[in-house]
Image: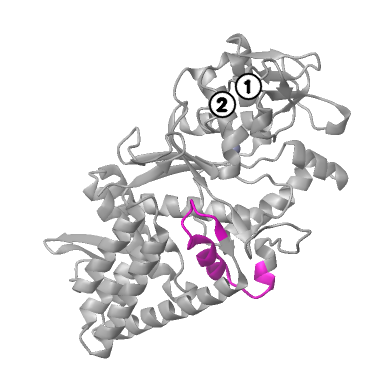
Amino acid sequence: MAFRIHNTLTRSVEELLPAVAGQVRMYTCGPTVYNFAHIGNFRAYLFEDLLRRYLQFRGFRVTQVMNLTDVDDKTIRSSREQGLPLKEFTKKYIDAFFADLKTLRVEPAEHYPAATDHVPEMIALIQTLLDKGVAYQSDDRSIYFSIAKFPGYGKLAHLDMSGLRSGARVAQDEYEKESAADFALWKAWDEKDGDVAWAAPWGRGRPGWHIECSAMGMKYLGPSFDLHTGGVDNIFPHHEDEIAQSEAATGQPFVKYWMHCAHLVVDGKKMSKSLGNFFTLRDLVGKGYSGREIRYALLATHYRQSLNFTFESLEAVRAALGRLDEFSDRLRAVAAGAGAVAGIGDPGAQLPAWAQQALAAFTDALDDDLNISAAFAALFDMITSGNRAMNEQALEAAGAAAVLGLLARFDAVLGILQPEQHQTDVAVVALLAQRQAARQAKNWPESDRIRDELKRLGWVIQDTPQGPKLKKC
Ligand SMILES: [Zn+2]
C-alpha cells in the first residue's frame, strides 16, 4: 500500500509522491515566540512529529524546516509592554519552546531558522515582487502584495473572489477571510515598532509575517517543495499569502501537498484564559502529568478531527501506558530467558502471527492519512494477543525478542514507551528498521548512512538469508 494523505489544496486524499523518490522536504510553521506555547499549539507540533516519524518508518529521508517567528505584530507589542529589547524578550520563549519539545519527545527538525536572521532574504524576495509588478508601495511607505495581480489567489482557502474590493489593503498580520485584501509584505517603521527596524531599498521597516515563511521555506527547501503543514488557522490568510508571494516570484508551484491539523478544545469548549480552561504544557506538567502522557493524549485523536482534551482522558492514557509498560516488561523477562542479544529484538527472528498481523494493521492504519486510532488499536490488540500467548507459555525467548523489536519499531513512530530502560534499544532497533525501509525503497545512500550511525553506537549489521542481524562490535 502507498502512504496517502489529505491535501488541503485539492480537498482529497492522495498518495504522497515526493519530487525526489525517497526524500521528503517539508516545512512546518513554527511558534510565534511571544509566550509559552499552549497545548493547542503542541497538538499541531505533535501531528507534525507523527508525520515526520511515520515518513521515516516508511523509508523516506525527511528534511524538515520549522521557523521561529521572532518578529511580528505580537512579539513587538509584548516586548514593548515588558520593556525588553525584542531579542532578549523572544529568547526566553525560544528556549522554553525547545525545552517543551524535549518534554514531549518531539524529534528535532533539521533547521530552525529565526525570522530576524533572514531579513536580507525577505528583502530580496520583496524586491523580486516589486520588479515583477505584483507588489507596490502605498502612501504610508509600506509594501503590499496586489492580490488582483495573482490569478491563483484563494486556491488554498477556496475563496470566492468575486465580491472582493480591488485595491483594499490590510496591514495586520492576521485577518478574516471576509477581509481578504492586499496584504503587507513590508511594514514601514512607525513609533509603535520602537527600535525594531531594518533598512531596505524602499525605506526602513520590518517584514510582514507571511513573507517570513516564504523566504525561509524557499531558502532551505528550494522554490518548490513537497509538503507544508500547519494548523487549520494557518490556511487563511497565512498559507494563502505564502502561496501568492512565492509563486508570483518564482513562477513555480510552491508546495505540492498541504496538510492542516484541526483545533483542540478543552471539555468541549474553546480554550480561553477567561474560562479558566487555558493550559500551557508547563501547567499540565505542574499538575503531575508526564511528557509522554501528555504526548499520548495529544496524539491519539486523528489530526483532522477536533481534539477534546479532558483530565479524564489523561487518566485513561495513564492506564493505557501502564498496560504497555507491563507488556514490554513481560516480553523482556521472557526474552532474557534465552539471553537474546542484550534484550534487543532481532528482526531476523520469526514474529508470531499475531504480531505480524499487528504490524500489517498498524501500517495500513497510518498509510490511511495517519489513522492514529486504528494504529493504537493494532498496538493494543497485539498486547492482548501477546499476553494470552505468554499466559499459555506459547511464546519462546526468540519470539519475545522479535516482538520487543516490533514494539520498538512502533515506538519509533509513537514515542510513548517508558523512558529509562528502553532508550538505547529503541534507538538501535528503530535505526535498523529504518535501514530496512531504506533498502526496500532502494535508497542506498540512506541505508549506508544508517549502517554508519549504528556502527557509531557500537553495532554492526550482518545481512543473512534470514534477514539482518545485529552484533555488538
Ligand atoms: Zn508560517
Left or right of residue 367: residue 109: right
Q: Is residue 148 above or below residue 378?
A: above
In terms of depth relative to the viewer, which is nearer, 377 or 37?
Answer: 377
- Amino acid type assigned to the residue bearing label 1 in the image: Gly
Ligand 1 resides in the quarter of the picture at top right
Describe the element under mark 2 as helix, strand or loop.
loop
Q: How many marks?
A: 2
Any part of residue 275 in sight = yes
Q: CB under 8 Å between callouts 1 and 2?
A: yes
Q: Inspect this view and state whether residue 346 appears.
A: no
Residue 323 is left or right of residue 123, and the answer is left
Q: Position of residue 95 (x, y in %)?
A: 67, 53
Q: Residue 86, located in which quarter of the rendered image?
A: top right
Relative to 250, residue 465 above or below: below
Residue beneath disc 2: 160
Residue plotted at (30% across, 69% down):
405
The residue that label 1 is drawn on is 163
Mark 1 neighbour class, 10 Å CA radius: few under 14, some 14 to 19, many 20 or more: few
Look at 69% across and 15% down and name the residue there.
167
Q: Would you say 32 lies left or right of 247 here? A: right
Q: In the rendered structure, which amino acid carries the disc numbered 2? A: Asp
